[in-house]
Amino acid sequence: MITFGDGRQVPEDVTRAEVVERLGEPAQEIAPVGPKTSCVFYSVGEEGDTLWQFCFRGERQVSSAPVTG
């Protein structure tokens, strides 16, 4: 579980390994969502129905944003 601050503090263009090193193992992992693109999700502790999504093309991060369910 992370906070909104944790999600925002992850710099752009980091590797997947660096995200896991900073935040721990993700709560959920999704199979590829496009050519060479996959996403991982972390539960946001401040909001019960919010996840922070990090998407990667190969191993390099291409997007990061909170998503509500």
Image (cartoon, rainbow, N blue to C red):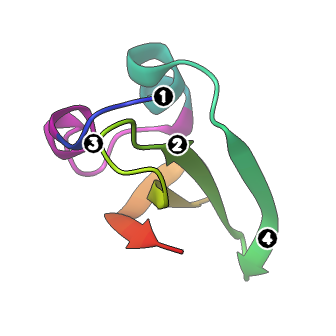
Q: Nearer the viewer, residue 65 or 63?
A: 65
First to last magenta residue range: 5-16
What separation in Å lies between label 3 and label 1 (alpha carbons)?
10 Å
Residue drawn at x 78%, y 61% is 30
Image quarter in which the C terminus is found: bottom right
- Answer with left or right where residue 19 lies relative to residue 47: right
**Disc 2 crowd, CA 10 A, few/some/many (<14, 14-19, 20+):** many
Q: Which mark is residue 32?
A: 4
Which of pointers 1 and 2 lies earlier in the amino acid sequence?
A: 1
What separation in Å lies between label 1 and label 2 (alpha carbons)?
6 Å
Q: Which mark is residue 1?
A: 1
Q: Amino acid at mark 3?
A: Gly
What separation in Å lies between label 3 and label 4 (alpha carbons)?
21 Å
Name the residue beneath numbered marker 2.
Answer: 42
Magenta stretch holds residue 25: no
Which of pointers 4 and 2 lies earlier in the amino acid sequence?
A: 4
Q: Amino acid at mark 4?
A: Pro
Furthest-front residue in this view: 48
Q: Nearer the viewer, residue 21 or 69?
A: 69
| Image marks 3 and 2: residues in contact by CB distance under 8 Å | yes
Q: Amino acid at mark 1?
A: Met
Query: Where residue 51 appears, x then y in whole percent?
Result: 48, 56
